[in-house]
Image (tube, rainbow, N blue to C red):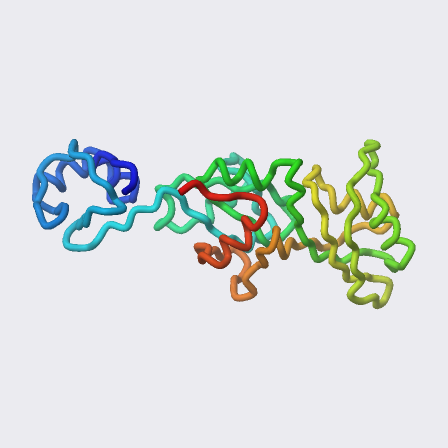
Amino acid sequence: MGEKIRLDKLLSNMGKGSRSEMKDALRYGYIKVNGETLRTGKEKVDPEVDEILYKGVPVIYKKHIYLMLNKPQGVISATGDKRHKTVVDLVDEAYAHYDVFPVGRLDIDTEGLLILTNDGELTHELLAPKKHVPKVYFAQVDGVVGQADVEAFTAGITLDDGYACRPSDLVVQSVADGVSNVLLTIHEGKFHQVKRMFEAVEKPVTYLKRVKMNALELDPALALGEMKELSEVEFEALTRGVYEPKV
């Protein structure tokens, strides 16, 4: 048994239309609950138990939605902005009624994995500093990243404002023509942190992409600007050891 919700509110929350539009739909006999045509939206229903049909099509109730976005450059991690396109502007119309927001942020020129949701509790847990949720970035860096840099990152880089970062895992994938391809795992989310960490060792980042958050990897099938709903397996990977959804 789940929480009972007013029928008109449930239909509106599922993107079927406004409260006033649902009033008309009910009056015209478009909505059935457990085989019975209802004419008013004031009745309360249990979406986990009751069969709800809108124009003959089952209404599947979801309180929360979890979307994976492959964020492109030039888009900001916000719900609204007067100058720039936001990640919310990329949300498909099918999910628009959920009023999602980004979990954390990626810089405007950073690409990659970003989660959008309407679950505030999950967002709080994933971003809580005490949780130390790991985030993995692929970066192209000007300069030859060597063992001394790896050891410096392992010890903990100090940023330009004196903040001492937690130990991080730096893996050098390749070095060619004075450019290094690296993977960096951090456990914080300070402003421009990855770029500032490499600036501290005088090797500026020229390209940055987040490829993993906790145990969730960016789906390689997602093109830049595309998003998809998380599967159960992907949701578990995102929340593993961090968040236990309430039953």
Q: Nearer the viewer, residue 36 or 15?
A: 36
Residue 171 in the image: state x and y as whole percent.
Answer: 78, 60
- The residue positioned 83% from the left and 66% from the top of the image is 175
Image quadrant where residue 45 sits: top left
Residue 23: name its quadrant. Answer: top left
Query: Which residue is found at the position 52% from the left and 66% from the top?
Result: 221
Residue at x-position 60% and y-position 42%:
105
Along the horizontal axis of the image, is 246 left or right of 181? left
Q: Nearer the viewer, residue 79 or 163?
A: 163
List x then y, in percent, for residue 132: 67, 42
> In the figure, is residue 56 to the left or right of 119?
left
**Residue 85 seen in render:** no
Q: Is residue 27 left or right of residue 216?
A: left
Where in the figure is residue 206, as x and y percent of width and height?
A: 75, 54
Report which quarter residue 28 is drawn in: top left
Which residue corresponds to the image point at 83% horizontal and 45% vertical from the top-left?
A: 199
Quarter the C terminus occupies? top left
Q: Relative to 57, does residue 2 appear above or below in the rendering?
A: above
Q: Is residue 146 visible?
A: yes
Q: Is residue 78 above or below residue 186?
A: above
Query: What number of labels is visible?
Result: 0
Q: Is residue 190 above or below residue 54?
A: above
**Image quadrant for the N terminus?**
top left
